[in-house]
Amino acid sequence: MHKVEYICQKEISAIDKLLATNGDAVELARNLGIARLSHFVHQRLSEAMVE
């Protein structure tokens, strides 16, 4: 199980750009192996992708 809080926001942003998910938090979560996208995880990914 992956814990998104252990991934720094700059890394999330870089992964988003590398995978070309275009700011889609659901697609990014699936690529990271996160099976359940809770509100907290969705918010964290979305905030990181804005940077």
Image (cartoon, helix red, strand yellow):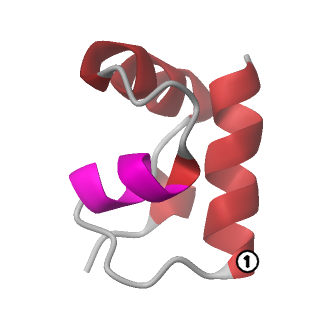
Residue 30 seen in the figure:
yes
Residue 32 seen in the figure:
no
**Main SS class of the magenta portion in the image:** helix
Quarter of the image with the N terminus is bottom left
Q: Check disc 1: other Cα within 10 Å, few if <14, some if 14-19, many if 20+.
A: few
Which of the 4 image quadrants contains residue 24? top right
Residues in magenta, as a range:
26-32
- Residue at 67% x, 33% y is 48
Is disc 1 placed on a helix, strand or loop? helix
From the top left corner, tell me how far across and down residue 39 is, in percent: 73, 77
Under mark 1, the amino acid is: His
**Residue picked out by circle 1:** 39
- Residue at 42% x, 26% y is 16
From the top left corner, tell me how far across and down residue 7 is, in percent: 46, 46
Quarter of the image with the C terminus is top right
- Residue at 55% x, 21% y is 10
Residue 7 lies, with reference to residue 34, above or below; the image says: above
From the top left corner, tell me how far across and down residue 50 is, in percent: 74, 23
Residue 33 lies, with reference to residue 6, above or below; the image says: below
